[in-house]
Image: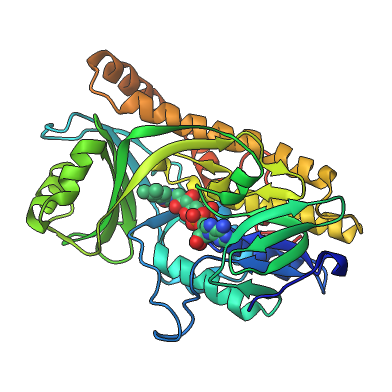
Amino acid sequence: MTQVASADTGAPYDVAIAGGGFTGRALALALASLAPKGFGIALVDAEKPHAGPPPNGAPPKQDARALALSAATKNLLSVLGVWPALEGGAQPINSIEITDSPLHAELRPHFLGFEDVLNADEPGAYLVEYGPLYRALEDAVAQSGAIDIFAPDTVADYAADAFSVTAKLASGGALTARLLVAADGRNSKLRERAGIKCVSWSYPQVGIVTTVAHTRPHHGRAVQHFLPAGPFAMLPLTGNRSSIVWTEEKERGAEIMALDEAGFIAELARRFGAKLGELKLAGPRQSFPLALQIARAFIADRLALIGDAAHVVHPLAGQGLNIGMRDVAALAEVIVEDTRLGLDVGSPVGLERYQRWRRFDSAFSAAVMDGLNRLFSNDAAPLRVLRDLGLGLVDRAPAVKRFLVREAAGITGSVPRLLMGERL
Ligand SMILES: Cc1cc2nc3c(=O)[nH]c(=O)nc-3n(C[C@H](O)[C@H](O)[C@H](O)COP(=O)(O)OP(=O)(O)OC[C@H]3O[C@@H](n4cnc5c(N)ncnc54)[C@H](O)[C@@H]3O)c2cc1C
């Protein structure tokens, strides 16, 4: 479906969203279910819709990632009515263990654990596989009836004036709205067209992701081994399976990715250890370039950036999407409140409020991940002594651990109401 709107017809949409990844779809759903009746929403996505089996729909999107979703993200997905579709396949994280050792170590001693401060009734995080999360959001958007979908198509350019913004589609059409949201990922075209620069650097590391099956149960325990090349995370999935997020130096990462299955499993087992029994691959392997990237502004004239278009962080604490969902909840709250007051949702006042809410918080989270990666991804003995002393001290301080768990759950600071599970 492609709608052509000429400038003199006014703005047929209140909000047009460029990008139908997790954050773009979550924002579309939040506005569809919470904004007043008649609120116009357009969603443009480069991907072909997957509804129905091929050849009608494209094959389901393949991605080896599983995502650690914070309690706050779960609250948001519950308000949006998406969580019930995910619940059966979501693995709660019941305990967390952190170790710090060289690769050749026979044992990886426990330095920091969180089981004493995690609440079994309300876990701080859940592991959900990429495919089911994508499908749940895609189905909910398709069924909402209040969102006009333009896919496959992309927003190639845009122009804003005092009253509206026009998004030019690659297919040749155009959409007019009060506000354009860039949810178009880390290489955001709209951010570039707006002339927004980023503070960014690439890590000399890649993130290797795969799924393994093991013979013994993990009991919902997430393990992070800090190794000299970078963190190696074993994240529990439903059944006797774990998702692996394995940070390696770039060159070594390419060598590991090129190994045959037996060689890859042997390298993986050196890091994974023997606690969970025999290992076998239970999913594809995929390698991601890693970077830190923060947009210098999250807004421009009638434009707001959300998700990876606004910030990309190191995946060591599984926070990238959770930070993006905080953008979704904050922007939805600003838009819904302004609409109820009869205000223009693309006005600088509302956009400034969104930026103040989200930019510092995102930059702070990115800096914390960056600092942890720098502190742990090395083999310097004096640094290891210092950081292990620090981990040991934190391990003996339940109040500090409770604070860290609340931070990871996304429920500290000025929290948008959707993340507390409240409807607006
Ligand atoms: C190895 C790894 C592990 C991770 N693990 C976790 C984790 O455990 N927990 C967590 O919270 N986060 C994690 N993340 C981060 C998380 O994957 C991302 O933050 C998240 O997927 C970003 O979602 P998004 O919707 O912002 O962007 P994207 O998923 O990149 O979506 C962008 C969408 O926009 C579309 N698009 C692009 N250009 C245009 C255009 N011009 N017009 C229209 N559409 C366009 C694309 O087709 C795509 O559908 C991980 C990341 C990596 C690399």
Could you tell me which quadrant the C terminus lies in? bottom right
Q: Quadrant of residue 143?
A: bottom right
Residue 291, relative to residue 44: is it above or below?
Answer: above
> x, y percentage for residue 369?
45, 34
Instruction: Please determine whether, in this image, residue 261 is positioned above or below residue 308.
Output: below
Q: Is residue 129 left or right of residue 380?
A: right
State the image quarter where residue 356 is shown: top right
- The number of callouts visible is 0
In-image side of 396 versus 224 (left or right) = right
Left or right? Give the position of 404 relative to 38.
Answer: left
The percent coordinates of residue 383 (x first, y second) are 30, 17
Residue closer to the observer: 112 or 90: 90
Q: Nearer the viewer, residue 208 or 14?
A: 14
Outermost residue, right side? 342
Is residue 17 visible in this depiction of the protein? yes
Is 102 placed left or right of 327 in the picture?
left
**Relative to 313, does residue 16 appear above or below in the rendering?**
below
Q: How is the image coloured?
A: rainbow
Res 233 seen here: no
Q: Residue at x 63, y 46 (%)?
A: 193
Give the percent coordinates (x, y) of residue 261: 11, 58
Q: Quadrant of the N terminus?
A: bottom right
- Outermost residue on the top side: it is 382
Point 61% across, 60% down: residue? 155
Front residue of this view, candidates 179 and 70: 179
Q: Which residue is pictured at 22% across the width and 33% down the height? A: 109
Q: Residue furthest front?
A: 172
Q: Quadrant of residue 165?
A: bottom right
Q: Position of residue 113 (x, y in %)?
A: 35, 38
